[in-house]
Image (cartoon, grey):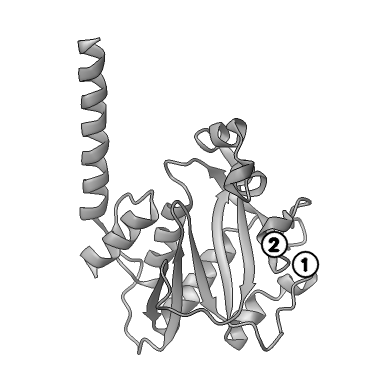
Amino acid sequence: MRRLGAWFGALAGLLLAALILGVLVPRQPEAVATGERTHRVLLLSSAIHTDLALPAEPWILDRFGFLEEAGLPLRDPAVAYVLVGRGGRSFYVETPTWDELRPMPVLRSFGLDAAVLRIALAGAIDPETAGVRAIDLDEAGLQRLADFALSSLTQNDAGAAILLDEQPEAYGPFSRFFEARGRFNALWGCNLWTAEALRAAGLETGLWTPLPGLLALSLDVHR
């Protein structure tokens, strides 16, 4: 029993060291902002997940025009943001609320689950709200961010995004799920995708930030 306790203690120490180094060791952005940072993106964080809210500028709406075919009112004047986040299909789609948590989606999230993107429309969001962080980008950075998000979508033979058959009502009427490229694993999951997207936009992040709080902390450390 003593040896087992020592083993678990060593494992916990290694995990803690990995988390600390994951925040402190930087990963460089793809490009450095050179223009005026006049475009505001929001980082939306829950306890375990992050989404990015892209401003509903006309060209952003044009790039996400396929959402209209998916039944979303993209051109409604009340739309202020297009929200994008990546996740595992089983956990993300089958567990819209904690009350619906089941063992199998959790186990799949630590294996190699299919990946999905959830794209949603939102109205005005107060950047001072808890769990919301404002990030100002230059135009080139916002373009690279949109490019990164769209490049994460799987496309059919016609080059169109693939809408999932299942669309959980719990996420609301202005949310849609699409097939995404690659596979999903919780240890390299949604928050690592968000960090990669932010690096594409020109921000430096930590090397490994599997939780929203770690990603936010790394942005503070490396800004």
Residue 144 left/right relative to 203:
right
Residue drawn at x 47%, y 47% as measured from the top left:
189
User: In the image, what residue type sits under mark 2?
Assistant: Arg
Q: Which mark is residue 176?
A: 2
Quadrant location of residue 81? bottom right
Tell me the residue that label 1 is attached to. Answer: 70
Whole-Å distance between the Cαs marked 1 and 2? 7 Å
Query: In this rendering, does residue 155 appear at all?
Result: no
First along the sequence among labels 1 and 2: 1
Q: Is residue 188 above or below residue 43?
A: above
Q: Is residue 215 above or below residue 123?
A: above
Residue drawn at x 31%, y 75% as measured from the top left:
32
Q: Residues within 10 Å of mark 1 (few under 14, many from 20)?
A: some
Residue 216 placement (x, y as % from top left):
33, 62
Q: Does the CB distance between marks 1 and 2 fall below 8 Å?
A: yes
Q: Secondary structure at mark 1?
A: loop
User: In the image, what residue type sits under mark 1?
Assistant: Ala
Quadrant location of residue 123? bottom right
Query: In this rendering, does residue 192 appear at all?
Result: yes
Q: Secondary structure at mark 2?
A: strand
Residue drawn at x 79%, y 70% as measured from the top left:
71
Q: Nearer the viewer, residue 106 or 158?
A: 106
Quadrant location of residue 114? top right
Q: Quadrant of the C terminus?
A: bottom left
Q: Quadrant of the N terminus?
A: top left
Residue 104 placement (x, y as % from top left):
61, 31
Q: Is residue 128 above or below residue 207?
A: below
Q: Nearer the viewer, residue 180 or 212?
A: 212
